[in-house]
Amino acid sequence: MSDKICVGAIAGAFGVHGEVRLKSFTTEAADIAGYGPLWTENGERSFTVTLTRPVTGGLGARLSGIATREEAEALKGTTLWAPRTALPNLPDDEFYHADLIGLEVVDTGGKVLGRVRAIFDHGAGDILEIASTPPLLLPFTRQIVPTVDLTAGRIVADPPGSDE
């Protein structure tokens, strides 16, 4: 497991005074400001986040050290990371996406299906992308994915149509 979790991304500049449009990946969008300084993925820069207002597609925010629109625009696409220790512990049936990426996926008979490559959320629930030939997309539900064992580094899945 990683010692940091991606909690948001900068979608671009907002206004002319250095505000950014921030996309939060936290359950409650405003929680992103409460995790202390957030870091860039490479750990070279950190920012204290002060939320200013809701904006279309995210939140308006000020980042420490960013004072102009040009500085804010230069950060577009930057992901923001919080130390795992700053985040809440999750119940046993919830997982940080970062912890699922790379896990081996096997079917209920033990046959290896591949590894989790990505997780998508299109609004109706998470979808696991399994790296295999061809790639496999699985709804991340208890029915389809009955077991996630982070300690063993594997997921047991019962893909639709596997009973046929």
Image (tube, grey):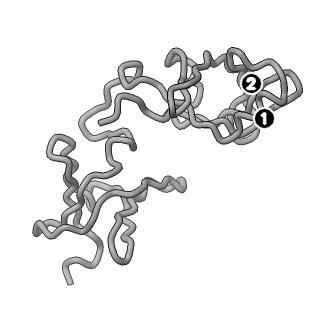
Cα distance, mark 1 to mark 2?
Answer: 18 Å
Q: Is residue 37 above or below residue 124?
A: above
Q: Which mark sits nearer the N-terminus, 1 or 2?
A: 2
Q: Secondary structure at mark 1?
A: helix
Q: Nearer the viewer, residue 40 or 107?
A: 40
Residue 16, position in %: x, y? 89, 26
Question: Looking at the rendering, in which quadrant would you find the C terminus?
Answer: bottom left
- What residue appears at the point 54 percent right and 56 percent down from the top-left corner? 122
Is residue 41 found left or right of 158 in the rendered image?
right
**Which numbered dot is residue 73?**
1
Q: Is residue 162 above or below residue 28?
A: below
Count of picture labels: 2
Q: Residues within 10 Å of mark 1 (few under 14, many from 20)?
A: some
Is residue 79 found left or right of 101 in the rendered image?
right
Residue 43, position in %: x, y? 50, 26
Q: Nearer the viewer, mark 1 or mark 2?
A: 1
- What residue appears at the point 24 percent right and 68 percent down from the top-left corner? 113
Residue 21, position in %: x, y? 73, 33
* Extreme residue in the left direction: 109
Q: What's the residue type where badge 1 is placed?
A: Glu
Q: Residues within 10 Å of mark 2 (few under 14, many from 20)?
A: few
Quarter-of-image position of residue 99: top left
**Which numbered dot is residue 120?**
none
* Extreme residue in the bottom direction: 164
- What residue appears at the point 67 percent right and 16 percent down from the top-left corner? 50
Question: Looking at the rendering, in which quadrant would you find the N terminus?
Answer: top left
- The residue tagged 2 is 53
Q: What's the residue type where badge 2 is placed?
A: Arg
Q: Secondary structure at mark 2?
A: strand
- What residue appears at the point 27 percent right and 41 percent down from the top-left corner? 93
Residue 131, position in %: x, y? 35, 65
Is residue 96 found left or right of 114 in the rendered image?
right
